[in-house]
Amino acid sequence: MNAIETHQLTKVFPGDIRAVDGIDFEVKEGEIFAFLGPNGAGKTTTIKMLNTLIPPTSGTALVTGLDVVKNATEVRRRIGYAAQDVGVDEHATGKENLTLYGHFYRLDNKTIKEKVKEIFDLVGLTGSENRMVSTYSGGMRKRLDLAMGLIHQPQVMFLDEPTTGLDPQTRASIWEYIRKLVESKGMTIFLTTHYMEEADRLADNIAIIDLGKIIAMGTADELKKSIGGDVVTVTPCQDTDEACKEFVSRSEAALAGKTFITGTKSTNHELAVYVNDGASAIPSIMHFLSGEGIEVKTISMSRPSLDDVFLKYTGRTIRTEEGSRTTFAQLRRMRDRRQQR
Ligand SMILES: Nc1ncnc2c1ncn2[C@@H]1O[C@H](COP(=O)(O)OP(=O)(O)OP(=O)(O)O)[C@@H](O)[C@H]1O
Ligand SMILES: [Mg+2]
């Protein structure tokens, strides 16, 4: 049996905002499954439908074999949830926070006591149980938040951006705790992230989501292999202004139709060129660009990353989405224009 299964799951908010737009995916028991996507992709909305906080507009979702609408109460008993915003009480100790959750789930005092000890150990907070949460660091709060979703031994744990805003070291330690949950408890983890590295390093399977649709799905390796070969990134200018954009499109035009190139994608300031063999392609790329009078500022070669996968399918990078103020409506128009081409 799959831990999670969706069929054409859809959520439309008032104003015809199709936050989640007919998605199908399966998560196997005991796996870590990541939803990778930029701001506004529909990650939190999906999580909220799966954990019964909001009803789907249409389509279905099964969690541990149970329909999230018809069997909402039982689904809630079987799952844990750490929301995007940390939901711990600052003015209580870590232990008090966790104990309160135990009571929410109607566990008896003895079980709560045992669980509190076990979970603090699991998330690496032993020794800080009796400190006020207001004295915890950001990473400790995140770990306490994760701990609170674990008190009732859920079969499936939903983590909405478990490491956003944390430094790389704390992020790595949270990854370790997540892995421990899977290994020691056989739990299934569904997490969302906009960090490619997080999905890459942690997840068994990844769905890349953009504007409410799953645009690619598979293991990190499968997704990267779907691009094939190497990626040569050419930066023909240093700024991100209009002139730079023009340089990029001239570069793309100069390389169009060359047989050693399997594809190109441009952003405002750089051009990604997909080739089978980067080392032999770089001199040719330089040759064709200089032939058009384009002076290359930097050129680099890499194996495809998940960002390249995202770029290939959407024409945008996840990186540039962070902190961008592009509205959902603008992004949808961009997608529609792309589909019309
Ligand atoms: N209650 C709501 N009413 C109207 N629109 C909403 C509501 N909740 C979410 N949306 C919209 O749905 C889209 C998807 O939002 P969602 O929160 O699921 O994205 P996300 O992928 O979690 O983004 P982030 O990475 O910023 O957390 C966005 O355009 C958002 O503005
Ligand atoms: Mg979100």
Image: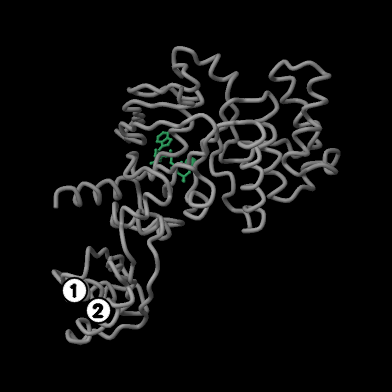
The answer to which of marks 2 and 1 sits earlier in the sequence is 1
Q: CA distance from mark 2 to mark 1?
A: 7 Å
- Identified by mark 2, the residue type is Ile
Residue in front for this viewpoint, 42 or 254: 254
Q: Please tell me in which quarter of the rendered image ligand 1 is found.
A: top left
Residue at 47% in and 37% down: 44
On the image, the x and y values in percent for residue 144 come to 71, 39
Label 2, secondary structure: give it: helix
Vertical order, 150 against 241 (above or below): above
Answer left or right for 171 relative to 329.
right
Vertical order, 302 against 298 (above or below): above
Residue at 66% in and 58% down: 169
Which image quadrant is residue 107 in?
A: top right
On the image, the x and y values in percent for residue 227 come to 31, 57
On the image, the x and y values in percent for residue 283 come to 27, 83
Vertical order, 113 against 304 (above or below): above
On the image, the x and y values in percent for residue 271 come to 29, 70
Vertical order, 164 against 132 (above or below): below
Answer left or right for 181 relative to 4.
right
Outermost top residue: 70
Tag 2 and tag 1, C-beta contact below 8 Å: yes
Which image quadrant is residue 181 in?
A: top right
- What residue would you read off at disc 1? 255
Residue at 55% in and 35% down: 189
Tell me which colouring the rendered structure shows.
one colour
Label 1, secondary structure: give it: helix
- Identified by mark 1, the residue type is Leu
- What residue would you read off at disc 2? 285
Would you call the spot at circle 2 few (<14 residues within 10 Å), some (14-19), or many (20 or more)? Answer: many
